[in-house]
Structure formats: structure tokens, C-alpha cells
């Protein structure tokens, strides 16, 4: 336990140290400064830009990254990102664009005359910084990253300034005019209703060709913005943010300032020209040519072919402001000239979604690492796959949260996908009305709060107003359909004049669940029905999405007259909508596959390592701490094995105690037992043994022993052998010296064998060829708290003896017995049973029958089952068990068939003793065997034990019932506090005691063992 | 002659003996009874429970599909029991095996018989794992039987996407499911077994294993742990659902098996090592 605690503490210490020492991300300090730039069409406007420069944290020269903020933000909104990028080893410059934050100037919507010129001058400024790596004079190694408004400036600057080396524009536009005035319909030029099937391909081409502005269809949504449907709510939010910037961003500073002038209230910090145009288009809901021209000026699409910097486009799938088609247009335009472009559709955008901030950061940092730092520039493939799509990966098995997968494709297939699946739609021609005033309007996405309303995966709230929408539905899918790109469908609209409609593609699960509108996106269409024709056909390009239609789901095309996010005509009107062609062309991308992860290395490595560690654990566990003492034992065994001459190390008899002082009950060389077939065939009535305290463990004590022995008549080698250091603890006090001596004396006389110290002696076992049943040497065992339960215990039991192990509670009797059974490892010393050292599970234990500390049975089994299964568990032949004899001892009768849990304490006790006697073991160890037995049973048990020993076996009985021991045992070992106090034949102990007892107590009675015992353990004195 | 005649260490505690010793226990009977009765209880619950709106929904939760076919029902029964009931069953068989012997004091007599300690653990582990496997296998098999009798032998409908797979095609998959369930329970088994060798209280061993299991379940809900959670033993517990997907995906199950085997190997090794050196004082 202590070791475990120490281990835990050590691990904790290591952990804490690692935590403290582990290199934390380098600290980055921003330097605020105002940089004055000059811009305007005539380069005559001075603007102060509020910037923060983050030098690379590790000093030296590093590539620079410009981080642009989104619309309505300032340099503060990208501060955390800037610190993170700088920690990645870049010099980072953030700035508040003109008209935002504390920068001066007015918002010009990323115009090449204004914002672009500003950023070029920021790059000039960077080129002068000593921290920034230069490609050439006044040409720093620089990348630009930014989202939305900041993404557009990245694109615009890269187009206008070739010094830019890499850009990562996110959720941004390619054509601002198209973003605000989209039209997803390509009207078939011949306004006839016939021949619809054959003309599909032509009409698409024709539609592209007719776009007047050329770049107008680049965003992939059909006809030009002049006929587009005004994205009313987004535009309002967009411009509103610019207007309200003062009060938001600079509120504290200007709180006490004068109220806004009418002009300020009207236009905020917008350039007045932009403000005027916005007000006009917002009122009419129609794009004027001037407006389109102005917005186009701020659109990367017009200049994208000039971008030479490798571009990573990150576009959100949930973005009704700048949908995926904008990234598509940018990607195509930039890649046209061979510039490396990668495109990712992530789960996010202006309408919410997860945002995947960490993933985006990883992608952009990989992009910059390649194109700014030059890591891995030898490779031809871009660091980010050409096309990556974030998809729902089901639920995390642990948290049940949604997880995202990122399948990739090596080339970008465009919105038409690599393949097309056609899905049949059915539905009659349906009448739909445009309500007067355009209200109530259908809802697809509510700009600005879509992310709050929408779930992670659904399109949020989608409501179609009754009477305003026509629906065409497919049959339930028989196979899953993964739509990636823009679905196209051809519809026919009958009515008069101009029709403003909204097409959307629902995923319909069943009648119980509301249909979901993937990403909440809707395709606004405006078609003009030619005079007299009465109807028009148009190919509708539905919004680009990545969506999986599950098996059993239906696709539903809905064409509605209203949508909350757009400006719709206020005049009431009625149209008939039908399918011009019953097929829906669904693009799929075959090449999109999850990144080839393969099997993670640890899947194989970890179990293998674990198995190796397990093997090591098991292999090392085998060589225990006892290895050392084992080696010692071996040496001793070898010594003792040399019969006849080398036995000085194990004095079997007479306790000469000269080398290690193992005390022993030594039959005098031949009388091993009582009636047992003794080795030499003789029988002795008098149990002969030597009582030897034998505590000496030093060679020094030899002299003392010898000296002492000479005092003892007839005892040339009396085994006093008390070593000086232990004598006080073990031997009786000096007053009892005479009695002590008498004991030995008497013994030695009775023994009648004189052995010369050091002489080779013939031990009992030598004569019989059988080692002594039990020999204990220097046995020591400490409790956990360090107190010694058994302390240097040594004694020895000869064959045929019934040995009583006496001692008060806590003397260490049971602990000793447990060690005999191999249940507890001694801390020191050893136990030999029939010459074999006891270790856990040592085979010699099969010759030991034991009953220690109460019975142990399976309570649910009958007594007989218990006994039989126990024997079966030993694996020995059933014939060897002698069940009948054992069960006779138990004397349970019919109770044997009952479950043990019904037994009384005495019955269990008897059964346990019977179990111990199974197989008639040569050495029987019983711990308090008479506990719980009634007097007749006790008497019977006594006879059983005596009889058992008489058959040549050996019995060790521990007890504190002294009368019992007196009647049962031939020999006793008295223990106290873990130490040996006295050993010897019972009769000897009593005799010797009688002399001193007569002297001390004078009561004339023969002493009882009780008195001797109390004497020995020192309670009486 | 060091050992008694007829004593051979590798013949001690034969598996047959240990199986009998354990089988006659009440807790074994009760646990198997419960596992075998559970499918029928579920069948009854589905039969007599409110029938919903009467129409067959295509909502594709596994519980809604349970009555579609015997196979679906078996998958459902496994999914509801794998997270807890089977964990308790496995923890019971493996956690109780040594600790209960210690509790009854019979452990010391077995060890003094003597059964070598490694062998005692090995035999007990084999038997405990055998009982655990029987528990894990018998539940889905009985559920298959009960479900087939109650709901017929139809093709399986996949939860989530609702695709159908022919019943005969899915039978081998079902074998994979059961196999994976077995492997994923190996951690519980090893953990319970380790605790069993350390304590004298059978309930402590079972409770300890189940408790640690619960802690792991809670930890894996902490998303802040990120990828570390993949190495929690409970994380891949439901990966067998992949075996019922139209396209068999091994990756989750491979990871789950890897984590499970890793923990199990280490825990069992520690159990053997500790027990080998342990002072048996019970």
C-alpha cells in the first residue's frame, strides 16, 4: 500500500513538473500603432488606420500575415486569432479597415481605390519592419486571411498587389451584385412552351451567353443582377451595420459627443456615393446599372484572374448571404490561370452552423506553412486537398454529440459534380398567388438569426404559406443520395408579366416529421413572361449544398411566390407552375472520400505493447524478493544434505547451538515417534528431546555455550546457546535460572546421548531417509505497521509428535501456521516441510492438512459436495482421499447432504477438520480444533489426534486451552509476542516446573501446564 | 518425495470442478434467469404497450425498429442491455470469483491444497470468462428466439438509414456483434477480476468494477478531453452498431477491441502479479 501511495505520489510529482516545465505557447505582445495611408481615386485622401503589429515571438525574421476583420468588426475582433497565428511563428498585422473601429475614413466596400490601396500601403509598412522576411526589397513574404468583408479584401488585394504570397479568404463573395441581387433562373430565350426536353442544354448555354456583364453569371446563378431579386434582409443588415458603427464601436468615446447630424444618421460611415445608391436600390428592390457597376467594382470576380497567390477558399455551407456558388466562381476564376486553389465547404457561414474554428485554423495554417514558410514546398500537391467538404459523421460514441467528417477530393469538380443522378419528380400544374404586399411571406432562412434558430444539421425553420407554393415530389428513394453541388430543374411558369419566385428543394422524411430544407437555402428566380406567350420555361439552378438524402426519403421541389429574406412584388398576381421536364438533375461527387486514415497505428501497437508489458509484469513478478533468501536456503539445504559430516549448520539434536542455534525436538537419534515405525525399529516411551532455547545466532556464542555446558552435569553439549543479545528477552529471569537449567539437565540425562559440539551427528531423518516434518528457522514476519508478528522463530517438529503450539492471543501462532501453509510470505527465515521449503503453492503442501482460523466452505454446496469438490480441486486420485475415514471423523450423518450454510458452528468445525484429514496428510496442522465442540466431541477429537499421530504422522495443534494441550500433546512450543519462549515435551515442561513450582509455591501439587505457561510468558512473575 | 502421491500441480482445480462450484450458486442462477427472461419481458412490453398511432413509422430509432423482426429485436435487446446489464453480469462473474472464496475462507484451503496461485487464478479466470461469455451470448440468442417467435423472421432494418439487409446476410453480422460485445466486455471482466484478487468482499469487487465503469462513462461525456476519450474503455462500447450498417465498418470496432484488449491484458497481468505475492489473510 505504501508503495502504491509512493508510486502515485511520484507520478503526480512527475505530472506536475511536466506541466510546469512544458513549454507553453510563446508569449505574443501586440504593438498598437496608427499608420497613415493615402488613398482615393486621386490618391489624395489621408486615412489613419488603427493597427496592431504582433512580432514573431521567437525573434528573427518571419513571414507576415495580415488578418482582416469582417464587416462591422475591427482589429479587436481578430485579436485572438492574431495571437494564435503569431504563436505559430509569423509576424501578424491586424488593422481596422477604413470606416471601422478607430480608423478614420469611410467605408468604400473594399474598393480598389480605397481599401485595396490601404492594404498595399500596409504591405509597404511591413516591408520596412525588421521582423518581416523579405522576398525582395519592399516585397515582404506576406499572406492575408480574413472572413467575409476581410475575405474579399484578401482577394482584392491579391489581385491588385502581386507581392501577396498566399491568401485564405473565408465566407466571402465573388460578386457583390450577384450576392445582393441573385437570380437562379436561366430563362429559355424562345418563350415557347414546346420542345422543352430538347432545348435544355442549349438554353443553359444561351443563358450564360446572354448575361450582359460577362462576369454576371460567374457566380453560377444564372441571369444578371439587374433582373435579380433583392436580398432585402441581408442587405439591410449589411448596410445597417455600417450605419450604426459609430454607436456600436465607438460608443464610449462618443457618448458625450453631439447628436448625429442628419447626414451621419442617414449614411453612418459609408461613403456617401455608396449610401445614395443603397438607398435607391433598397427602396425599389431593383438593381440599377450604377449600383451593379459600383458593386462589381468591389467584387473579386472582376479581377480574380489576376490573382497569382495560392488561394485557399473556405466557404460556409450555411450561408444565405454568400452561398457556396461564390466560392465556386472565385475558385474557377483564380484557377483558370493555374494558380493553386483549394476549396473547402465547412459547416458554418453567415447563417450559423458549427463554425469549425479549429479546423479552419488548421487548414489555413497548413496553407501558410507551405506558401509562406515554405514547409514541404517540394511536394506538388497543395497542403489542403483541392476540395474538402464537411459532412455529418453521426454521433460521437461517447458524448452522442454530432461529429464532422472531412472527405476530400483531389480535384474540384465544380457545382455540377462528377456525376449526375436524375430523380423523377411528379406533380400537376399548380396555381400559386403572390399575396398583395408580399405578406405573409414564406420563411427559409432568417438572416442574422438563422444560426440561433437552426439546429446543427437542419435548415432551421422553413415555412411555406398555403396557396403560395407549388410542390413536386419524388418517390421514396431506394438508395441513399448524396447531393454535392447545385441541383438543376426546368420549370414552366404561366402567367403575365414578370414572375418573382423562390425554388427550394426539401428533404421529406415522412409524414410525421416536417421536411427539412438543406442549409435553409432558397433559389430566387425572376422570369419575364413574354407578351402573348403566356408562359415561359426556365432552368433553375438550386442552391449548392452538400446533403444526404436517406433511403425512404423523398425529394420535394417547392416553388413559392414569397420569401421573407427577399423583396417581392407588392402587386397581387397568380401564376401556374409546372415541371417543364420531370427530372431533377442531382450532382454527386464520386471522388469525395473520407481522408484515407487507414487503421490508426495505436490500434495495433497498443494491444501489442500491453501484452508485452503484461508478459514483463508476469515474468518479473515471478522472481520475488525471496530470491535472495531462496539462494541462501539452497545453500543451507546443500549443507544439510551432506549427511553425516556436514551437519553443523542444522543441528538436529542436543541443541549444540553453535552456529545458528536452531532449537529442535530431537528424538534421540532413533525414537522418532511413539508407536510409529521408528527408523531403527525401537520404541521409546519417553519422548526424548532436547529443550534448547538455542537463540544464539552468532558464532561468538559457541564459547559461551561450551562454557555453560561444562557446568551441566552430563551435558557436554547442552544446548543453552543463548546469545547475549537475546537472552534477556527469551530466557526466564535469573531467579529461575536453576529451574531452567534443571529442565535441560533433566532432559539431557533422559536423553542420555552426549554429542560433541561440532561432531558429525546422525539425525533422525538421516536414519530414516526422511526429512523432519517441520522445521522453522529464524522465521520473521512483520505486520504492515512494522510490528513483528513473528520474530525470529525457530523450532522443529519430529515425526510422530503431537505438538501443541501455545501462546496468548497475538503470540503469532496463527501467523506462523499461515506461513506453514504458504499463504503468507515470511519476511525472513524459512519453513521446511519434509525438507522442502514452503513457498506459495509448493508441492510439498500436498502432504500438509490444515485447518486454520475456522472452516472455509462454499455455503451453497452440501457438506459432501464441499469435501468431494475440495478433493477434486487438489487433482489427486479419489482413491487417495479416504473420504470415509474423514467423514467418520466429521460425524455429520445425514447432515452431510445439506447445504453447509445450514450447519452449526460445531458441524462446520468438524467438517473442516475432516477436510484437513482428507488424504491422510503426513503433517496435520490444526488451529484451535476444539473450538465450538462439546465435551464428548472434544474428547473424541483428542483421541483422533493421538491416534493420527500414532500412525506415524505428525500433528500440530494450536490452542490456548491449556488443559486440552496437556492431554493431547506430546510436545509443546510456547510462543509469546512472536518469539519462542520454550519448547519441549509436555512431561518435561511439567516435571521441570514441578521442582521450581514446589520451591516457589510450595503447594505440593504437580504443576499444571497453565502455571508453567503463565510462568513462561511472564504473566505470573 | 516432496509431494504427496498423485499430486500434480497442473491437475489441480480442473475446470470442471470450478464450473460446478460456481454453477450451483444462487447468483449464477439468478443472473442467467434474468438474462434469459429479459427478452420475453421486452416482447410482452412491446405487445401490450401502446401501439402508437398504428401506422408504421419510418422513424428509424433502434427501439422503433425492434418489432420489425426477430433480428431487429435481438439487436435492440443487446443495445439496451450492453450498456449496463451485461456489464453487471460480467462484473459479477469475474469480480466475485476470487473475492467470494476469500470471503468464505475457502481460498486459503484451496491455496494450501495446494493449488499454485497462478493456476488458481488461471482456472478461475477461464471459468469466469466462460460464464461471462455465456451471459453475453445467451441474451441476444434468447432475444433472437423470442423476437422471431413474436415478430417473425424478417429482414433486418438498419437503424438510422432504414435500409434493409436480408436476414441471412445479417446472421454472420450478428455473430460479429456478439463477438465484439464479448471483446468490449473484456475490460470489465479484467477490472472486476483484478479488484477481486485485491479484496475479500465480492460485492466490493463487483461494485468497484461497475463504479469505475460508470466513472468512465461520465468522463467520456466530457468533450474537453478531446481525443483522449477514445482511450477510455467505455468509449467504443456501442461500436458494434457499425456491424449492422449496410457497409460493414471495422474501424470503430477495431479501435474498441484494441483499447479493450490493452486494458484487459494489463489489468489481468497486474492481477496475477499481485496475487502471486499477496499475503492471503482472509
Image (cartoon, coloured by chain):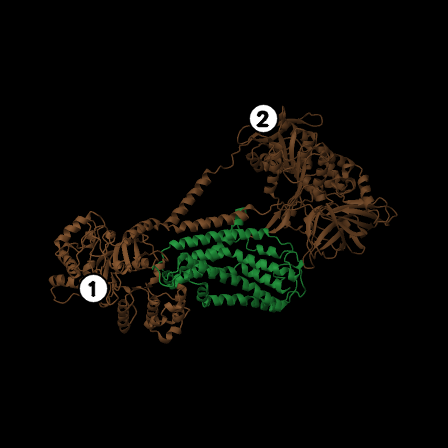
Chain colours: A brown, B green
Give me the disc on residue A167. Answer: none
Residue, disc 1: A687
Mark closest to the chain's N terminus, 1 or 2: 2
Residue, disc 2: A129
Res. B135 in view = yes
Q: Pick the residue in front: B160 or A875.
A: A875
**Image spot of residue A938 (x, y percent):** 27, 71
Apparent side of residue B215 relative to residue A715 in the rendered image (left or right): right
Look at 62% across and 67% down and name the residue there.
B148
Q: Chain of mark 1?
A: A
Q: Nearer the viewer, mark 1 or mark 2?
A: 1
Q: Chain of mark 2?
A: A
Q: Secondary structure at mark 2?
A: loop
The mark tally for this picture is 2
**Image spot of residue A567 (x, y percent):** 74, 45
Q: Secondary structure at mark 1?
A: loop
**Image spot of residue B28 (x, y percent):** 47, 66
**Image spot of residue A142 (x, y percent):** 62, 30
* Labelled pair 1, 2 in contact (Cβ < 8 Å): no
Amino acid at each position: 500500500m505504501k508503495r502504491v501511495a509512493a508510486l502515485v505520489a511520484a507520478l503526480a510529482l512527475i505530472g506536475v513538473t511536466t506541466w510546469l516545465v512544458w513549454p507553453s505557447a510563446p508569449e505574443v505582445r501586440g504593438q498598437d500603432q496608427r499608420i497613415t495611408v493615402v488613398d482615393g481615386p486621386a490618391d489624395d485622401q489621408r486615412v489613419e488606420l488603427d493597427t496592431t503589429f504582433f512580432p514573431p515571438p521567437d525573434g528573427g525574421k518571419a513571414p507576415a500575415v495580415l488578418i482582416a476583420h469582417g464587416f462591422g468588426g475591427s482589429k479587436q475582433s481578430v485579436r485572438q486569432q492574431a495571437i494564435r497565428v503569431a504563436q505559430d511563428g509569423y509576424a501578424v498585422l491586424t488593422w481596422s479597415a477604413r470606416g471601422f473601429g478607430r480608423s478614420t475614413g469611410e467605408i468604400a466596400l473594399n474598393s480598389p481605390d480605397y481599401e485595396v490601396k490601404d492594404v498595399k500601403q500596409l504591405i509597404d509598412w511591413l516591408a520596412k519592419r525588421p521582423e518581416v522576411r523579405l522576398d525582395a526589397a519592399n516585397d515582404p513574404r506576406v499572406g492575408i486571411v480574413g472572413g467575409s468583408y476581410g475575405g474579399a479584401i484578401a482577394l482584392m488585394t491579391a489581385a491588385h498587389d502581386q507581392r501577396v504570397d498566399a491568401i485564405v479568404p473565408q465566407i466571402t463573395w465573388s460578386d457583390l451584385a450577384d450576392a445582393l441581387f441573385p437570380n437562379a433562373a436561366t430563362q429559355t430565350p424562345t418563350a415557347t412552351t414546346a420542345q422543352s426536353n430538347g432545348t435544355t442544354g442549349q438554353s443553359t448555354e444561351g443563358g450564360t451567353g446572354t448575361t450582359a456583364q460577362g462576369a454576371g453569371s460567374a457566380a453560377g446563378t444564372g441571369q444578371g443582377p439587374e433582373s435579380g431579386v433583392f436580398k432585402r434582409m441581408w442587405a439591410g443588415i449589411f448596410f445597417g451595420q455600417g450605419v450604426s458603427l459609430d454607436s456600436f464601436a465607438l460608443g464610449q468615446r462618443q457618448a458625450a459627443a453631439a447628436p448625429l447630424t442628419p447626414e451621419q444618421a442617414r449614411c453612418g460611415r459609408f461613403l456617401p456615393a455608396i449610401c445614395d445608391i443603397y438607398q435607391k436600390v433598397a427602396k425599389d428592390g431593383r438593381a440599377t446599372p450604377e449600383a451593379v457597376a459600383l458593386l462589381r467594382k468591389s467584387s473579386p470576380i472582376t479581377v480574380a484572374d489576376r490573382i497569382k497567390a495560392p488561394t485557399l477558399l473556405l466557404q460556409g455551407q450555411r450561408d444565405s448571404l454568400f452561398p457556396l456558388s461564390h466560392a465556386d466562381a472565385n475558385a474557377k476564376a483564380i484557377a483558370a490561370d493555374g494558380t493553386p486553389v483549394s476549396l473547402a465547404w465547412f459547416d458554418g457561414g453567415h447563417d450559423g452552423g458549427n463554425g469549425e474554428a479549429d479546423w479552419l485554423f488548421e487548414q489555413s495554417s497548413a496553407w501558410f506553412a507551405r506558401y509562406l514558410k515554405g514547409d514541404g514546398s517540394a511536394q506538388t500537391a497543395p497542403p489542403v486537398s483541392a476540395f474538402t467538404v464537411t459532412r455529418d459523421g453521426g454521433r460521437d460514441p461517447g458524448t452522442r454529440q454530432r461529429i464532422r467528417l472531412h472527405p476530400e477530393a483531389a480535384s474540384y469538380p465544380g457545382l455540377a459534380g462528377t456525376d449526375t443522378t436524375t430523380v423523377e419528380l411528379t406533380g400537376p400544374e399548380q396555381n400559386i398567388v403572390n399575396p398583395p404586399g408580399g405578406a405573409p411571406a414564406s420563411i427559409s432562412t432568417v438572416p442574422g438569426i438563422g444560426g440561433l434558430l437552426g439546429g446543427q444539421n437542419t435548415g432551421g425553420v422553413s415555412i411555406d404559406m398555403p396557396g403560395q407554393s407549388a410542390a413536386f415530389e419524388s418517390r421514396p428513394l431506394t438508395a441513399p443520395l448524396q447531393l454535392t453541388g447545385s441541383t438543376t430543374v426546368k420549370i414552366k411558369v404561366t402567367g403575365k408579366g414578370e414572375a418573382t419566385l423562390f425554388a427550394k428543394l426539401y428533404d421529406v422524411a415522412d409524414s410525421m416529421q416536417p421536411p427539412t430544407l438543406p442549409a435553409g437555402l432558397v433559389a430566387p428566380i425572376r422570369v419575364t413572361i413574354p407578351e402573348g406567350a403566356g408562359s415561359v420555361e426556365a432552368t433553375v439552378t438550386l442552391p449548392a449544398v452538400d446533403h444526404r438524402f436517406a433511403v425512404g426519403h423523398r425529394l420535394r421541389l417547392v416553388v413559392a411566390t414569397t420569401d421573407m429574406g427577399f423583396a417581392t412584388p407588392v402587386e397581387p398576381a397568380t401564376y401556374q407552375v409546372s415541371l417543364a421536364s420531370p427530372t431533377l438533375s442531382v450532382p454527386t461527387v464520386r471522388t469525395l472520400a473520407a481522408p484515407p486514415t487507414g487503421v490508426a497505428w495505436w490500434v495495433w501497437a497498443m494491444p501489442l505493447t500491453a501484452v508485452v508489458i503484461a508478459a514483463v509484469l508476469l515474468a518479473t513478478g515471478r522472481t520475488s524478493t525471496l530470491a535472495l533468501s531462496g539462494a541462501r536456503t539452497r545453500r543451507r539445504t546443500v549443507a544439510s544434505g551432506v549427511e553425516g559430516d556436514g551437519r553443523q549448520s542444522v543441528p538436529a539434536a542436543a541443541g549444540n547451538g553453535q552456529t545458528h542455534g536452531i532449537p529442535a525436538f530431537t528424538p534421540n537419534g532413533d525414537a522418532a515417534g511413539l508407536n510409529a515405525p521408528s527408523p531403527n525399529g525401537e520404541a521409546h516411551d519417553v519422548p526424548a528431546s532436547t529443550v534448547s532455547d538455542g537463540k544464539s545466532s552468532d558464532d561468538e556464542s559457541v564459547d559461551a555455550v561450551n562454557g555453560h555446558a561444562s557446568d551441566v552435569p552430563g551435558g557436554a553439549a547442552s544446548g543453552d546457546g543463548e546469545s547475549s543479545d537475546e537472552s534477556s528477552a527469551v530466557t526466564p529471569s535469573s531467579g529461575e535460572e536453576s529451574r531452567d537449567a534443571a529442565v535441560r539437565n533433566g532432559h539431557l540425562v533422559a536423553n542420555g546421548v552426549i554429542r560433541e559440539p561440532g561432531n558429525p551427528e546422525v539425525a533422525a531423518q538421516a536414519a530414516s531417509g526422511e526429512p523432519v516434518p517441520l522445521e522453522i528457522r529464524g522465521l520473521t514476519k512483520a505486520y504492515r505497521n512494522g510490528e513483528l508478528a513473528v520474530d525470529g522463530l525457530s523450532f522443529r517438529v519430529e515425526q510422530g509428535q503431537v505438538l501443541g503450539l501455545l501462546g496468548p492471543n497475538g503470540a503469532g501462532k496463527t501467523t506462523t501456521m499461515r506461513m506453514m501453509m504458504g499463504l503468507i510470505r515470511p519476511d525472513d527465515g524459512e519453513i521446511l516441510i519434509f525438507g522442502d521449503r514452503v513457498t506459495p503453492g509448493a508441492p510439498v503442501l500436498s502432504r500438509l492438512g490444515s485447518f486454520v482460523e475456522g472452516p472455509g466452505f462454499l455455503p451453497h454446496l452440501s457438506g459432501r459436495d464441499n469435501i468431494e469438490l475440495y478433493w477434486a480441486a487438489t487433482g489427486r486420485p479419489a482413491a487417495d482421499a479416504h473420504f470415509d475415514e474423514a467423514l467418520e471423523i466429521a460425524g455429520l450423518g445425514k447432515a452431510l447432504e445439506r447445504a453447509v450454510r445450514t450447519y452449526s458452528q460445531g458441524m462446520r468445525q468438524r467438517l473442516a477438520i475432516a477436510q484437513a484429514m482428507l488424504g491422510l496428510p503426513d503433517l496435520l496442522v490444526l488451529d484451535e480444533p476444539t473450538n465450538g465442540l462439546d465435551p464428548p466431541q472434544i474428547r473424541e477429537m483428542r483421541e483422533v489426534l493421538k491416534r493420527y499421530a500414532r500412525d506415524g504422522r505428525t500433528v500440530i495443534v494450536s490452542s490456548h486451552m491449556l488443559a486440552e494441550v496437556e492431554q493431547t500433546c506430546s510436545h509443546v512450543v510456547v510462543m509469546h509476542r512472536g518469539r519462542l519462549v520454550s519448547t519441549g515435551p509436555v512431561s518435561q515442561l511439567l516435571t521441570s516446573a514441578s521442582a521450581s513450582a514446589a520451591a516457589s509455591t510450595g503447594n505440593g501439587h504437580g504443576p499444571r501446564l497453565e502455571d508453567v505457561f503463565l510462568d513462561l510468558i511472564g504473566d505470573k512473575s | 518425495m516432496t509431494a504427496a502421491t498423485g499430486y500434480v500441480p497442473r491437475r489441480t482445480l480442473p475446470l470442471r470442478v470450478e464450473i460446478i462450484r460456481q454453477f450451483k450458486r444462487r447468483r449464477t442462477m439468478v443472473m442467467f434467469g434474468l438474462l434469459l427472461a429479459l427478452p420475453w419481458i421486452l416482447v410482452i412490453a412491446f405487445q401490450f404497450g401502446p401501439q402508437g398511432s398504428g401506422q408504421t413509422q419510418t422513424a428509424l430509432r433502434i427501439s422503433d425498429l425492434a418489432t420489425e423482426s426477430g433480428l431487429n429485436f435481438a439487436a435492440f435487446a443487446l443495445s439496451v442491455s450492453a450498456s449496463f446489464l451485461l456489464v453487471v453480469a460480467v462484473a459479477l462473474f469475474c469480480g466475485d470469483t476470487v473475492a467470494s472464496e476469500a470471503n468464505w475462507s475457502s481460498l486459503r484451503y484451496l491455496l494450501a491444497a495446494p493449488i499454485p496461485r497462478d493456476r488458481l487464478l488461471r482456472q478461475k479466470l477461464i471459468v469466469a470468462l466462460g460464464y461471462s461469455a455465456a451471459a453475453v451470448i445467451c441474451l441476444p440468442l434468447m432475444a433472437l428466439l423470442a423476437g422471431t417467435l413474436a415478430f417473425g423472421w424478417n429482414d433486418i432494418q438498419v437503424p438510422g438509414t432504414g435500409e434493409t439487409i436480408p436476414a441471412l446476410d445479417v446472421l454472420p453480422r450478428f455473430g460479429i456483434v456478439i463477438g465484439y460485445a464479448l471483446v468490449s466486455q473484456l475490460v470489465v471482466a479484467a477490472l472486476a477480476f483484478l479488484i477481486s484478487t485485491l479484496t475479500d468482499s465480492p460485492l466490493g469487487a463487483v461494485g468497484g468494477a461497475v463504479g469505475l465503469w460508470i466513472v468512465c462513462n461520465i468522463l467520456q461525456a466530457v468533450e474537453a478531453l478531446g481525443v483522449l476519450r477514445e482511450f477510455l474503455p467505455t468509449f467504443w462500447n456501442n461500436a458494434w452498431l457499425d456491424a449492422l450498417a449496410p457497409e460493414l465498418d471495422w474501424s470503430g470496432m477495431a479501435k474498441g477491441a484494441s483499447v479493450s484488449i490493452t486494458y484487459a491484458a494489463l489489468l489481468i497481468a497486474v492481477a496475477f502479479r499481485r496475487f502471486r505475492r499477496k499475503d492471503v489473510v482472509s
